[in-house]
Image (spheres, rainbow, N blue to C red):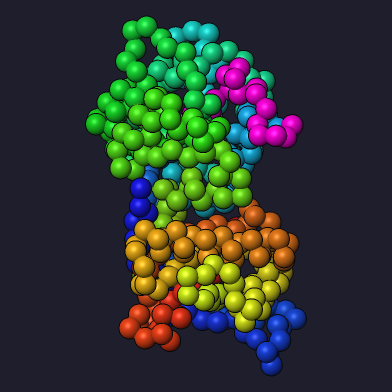
Amino acid sequence: MKRSKLVLLSCLTLFLLIGGAVIGSAADMVMGEKVVFRKTADNFIIMFDSSSSMGDRYGTGDMLEIDAEKQILREMFATLPELDWKAGIYSFTPGWSMSHFKPLLSMRTYSKNDFAGAVDSLPGNPSGYTPLQGGLVGVGELLGTLSGKTVVFLFTDGQYSAEPGFASPGAIAKGLAEKHDVCFRVIATGEKKGEYQAIKNISSVNECSAFVVFANLPGSPEKLTDILFKMERIAEQPVVKKEVVGFVAGKVLFDFDKSVIKDDSKDALITLSIYLKENPDKRVVFAGFTDNVGTDEYNVKLSKRRAESARTYLADKMGITADRITLSWFGESDPVASNDTEAGRTENRRVTAVITEK
């Protein structure tokens, strides 16, 4: 499924450098054009799996699958801006009665503190079976109380206990997608789980639904949150309530078809890290772009790798914690120079840094 192209981020500024050397303080960093973060969904629902099979070991380490589930949620909430979503966390396991769908954090206006703080209180001792069908029926009842577009994040190990009298999980999800404006993100513990019929059917009920693997998420929460909001360039008009404003602060350039940061762009990342350390209330969004050479699908993936490279450098080399870094990627969208010349294509092979409040 392709990411939608967005119009954003032009008129970019470079970081201040003195005599080719990085300045000792980032207090005078030039701030460029304003951008705004806007919702692309109105609500989201977390379906938390605490069934007995989530007590299996995750990967080759000592972490249990339920602990990995919690860690993914911690990173998700740490990097998600406050954009006035209606959101909640619900359990559909363990199932000891027909009341399979119950709130762990009932629907409310999203608050980073509320949701991040709730993770540690989520069930930690996996038990019981997995009444996925009843859980999806519960989601349907909740959707009937909501307006606008809703994203359902379904955590699962791919197993469920069939319940007589209910349609299959895929059929229930399909019926919900036909009745409501809803997208399903099915987050499973392993790659092979994507071949399980229930997961395959739920994650393909419509164009905006998808299958995501646990292993792809630690350190990359944007693979979940990209469906919830977008960035756009704005003029000087008033900002709508609960939109988050950021400022373009610089760019990092790349060679053709490469995602390795060029040496002459590393100084900008060093300066950015100084600024972030001096301003602990700030965070950065890296947005990746390409020139127009190659297919759209390839360029979207390349722009994502470039944004990931910027994050890796800032986190691993400069010690900025990952919960202060969010990624977006847009392929060849919104060139800042003409793609008809090599000089222009060079400018378009970039990652832009956008500073926002933490």
Q: Which secondary structure is most common in the magenta stretch?
A: loop
Who's the residue at 72% across and 69% down the image?
278
Q: Nearer the viewer, residue 131 or 148?
A: 131
Q: Nearer the viewer, residue 248 or 6?
A: 6
Q: Quadrant of residue 59?
A: top right
For residue 275, say whether it is visible: no
Q: Is residue 41 above or below residue 332?
A: above
Image location (x, y in percent) of residue 310: 59, 66
For residue 56, say whether it is visible: yes
Magenta stretch bounds: 47-62
| Residue 51 lies in the magenta-colored region | yes
Who's the residue at 50% across and 32% down the image?
192
Who's the residue at 30% across and 22% down the image?
171
Task: Single out the residue that lies furthest toward the bottom.
Answer: 19
Q: Where, quadrant-wise, is the C terminus in this rendering?
A: bottom right
Who's the residue at 42% across and 52% down the image?
229
Q: Could you tell whether 304 is left or right of 316 in the image?
A: left
Q: Nearer the viewer, residue 199 or 71?
A: 199
Q: Is residue 338 above or below residue 78?
A: below
Q: Is residue 185 above or below residue 242?
A: above
Q: Nearer the viewer, residue 86 or 73?
A: 73
Number of marks: 0
Image location (x, y in percent) of residue 209: 36, 39
| Residue 42 lies in the magenta-colored region | no
Q: Could you tell whether 193 is left or right of 23 in the image?
A: left
Task: Single out the residue that lies furthest toward the left.
Answer: 178
Q: Is residue 115 above or below residue 356?
A: above
Image location (x, y in percent) of residue 9: 42, 71
Q: Quadrant of residue 338?
A: bottom left
